[in-house]
């Protein structure tokens, strides 16, 4: 057990804009480490907040999506979600993303809280929502960067998918844990 004091905030000395990376804007913060008075140039990726949605059908099936992810270069299994548009409230974004990506809507909505996707370099939050008793009553409205297959599965199969590593997106796992205690 260490007797050292708790870390303190690092003083912001200056900021420099970095390149615009389309999904993110970047900047460099120069910070002063209070422990040793050393300056450090820190990369910050600025992003709008994100949402993800644990959607349950009346039969308690979970709505999932399969889609190609550029970062991994492979198809992943996730729950519906996306970016909160400028001026949009995160609950409205969750409803919009669910309908656009899956065609499902309706139900009883419960906010599950937010998590920090990666506070080491990202400045945003991911808001988690649960919606129960959704029905597929719309057609999907995919943007040019999406190619999505929608499917549902039961809680037991979902647990198997997580255990096998078939479903391993960290923000999805957080939301599923909060909603279903998986």
Image (cartoon, rainbow, N blue to C red):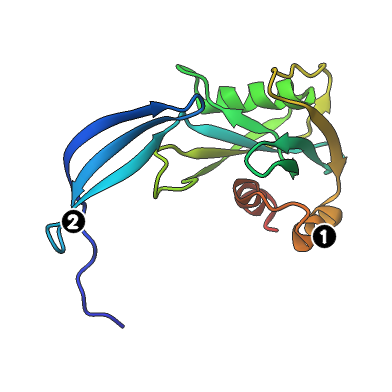
Q: 149 and 99: which one is in front?
A: 149
- Secondary structure under tag 2 reads loop
Q: Residues within 10 Å of mark 1 (few under 14, many from 20)?
A: few
In the image: residue 78, left or right of residue 60: left
In the image: residue 112, left or right of residue 17: right
Displayed quadrant of residue 43: top left
Which residue is labeled 2 in the image?
A: 33
In the image: residue 60, left or right of residue 84: right
Residue at 54%, 33% in the rendered image: 50
Q: From this view, report whether residue 70 is shown above or below residue 171.
A: above
Displayed quadrant of residue 28: top left
Residue 106 in view here: no
Q: From this view, report whether residue 66 is shown above or below residue 158.
A: above
Residue 103 in view here: yes
Q: Quadrant of the N terminus?
A: bottom left
Q: Residues within 10 Å of mark 2 (few under 14, many from 20)?
A: some
x and y percentages locating residue 148 in the rendered image: 79, 29
Sequence-first disc among 2 and 1: 2
In the image: residue 126, left or right of residue 76: left
x and y percentages locating residue 126 in the rendered image: 52, 39
Q: 136 and 27: which one is in front?
A: 27
- Secondary structure under tag 1 reads helix
Q: Real-space Cα distance between discs 2 and 1?
A: 45 Å
Residue at 41%, 48% in the rendered image: 119
Q: Quadrant of the C terminus?
A: bottom right
Residue at 46%, 30% in the rendered image: 24
x and y percentages locating residue 117 in the rendered image: 50, 45
* Closer mark to the observer between disc 2 and disc 1: 2
- Residue farthest toward the left in the current orientation of the protein: 37
Residue at 21%, 43% in the rendered image: 30
Q: From this view, report whether residue 117 is shown above or below residue 151.
A: below
Mark carried by residue 160: 1
């Amino acid at each position: 057990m260490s007797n050292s004091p708790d870390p303190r905030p690092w003083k912001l000395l200056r900021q420099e804009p970095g390149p615009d990376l389309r999904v993110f804007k970047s900047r460099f913060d120069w910070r002063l480490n209070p422990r040793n008075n050393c300056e450090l140039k820190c990369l910050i990726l600025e992003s709008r907040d994100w949402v993800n949605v644990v959607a349950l059908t009346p039969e308690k099936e979970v709505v999932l999506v399969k889609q190609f992810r550029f970062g991994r270069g492979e198809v992943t299994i996730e729950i519906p979600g996306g970016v909160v548009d400028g001026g949009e409230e995160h609950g409205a974004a969750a409803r919009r993303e669910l309908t656009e990506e899956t065609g499902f809507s309706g139900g009883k909505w419960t906010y599950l809280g937010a998590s920090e996707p990666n506070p080491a370099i990202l400045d945003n939050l991911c808001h988690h929502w649960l919606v129960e008793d959704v029905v597929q009553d719309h057609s999907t409205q995919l943007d040019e960067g999406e190619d999505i297959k929608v499917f549902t599965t039961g809680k037991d199969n979902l647990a198997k998918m997580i255990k096998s590593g078939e479903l391993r997106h960290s923000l999805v796992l957080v939301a599923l844990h909060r909603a279903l205690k998986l």
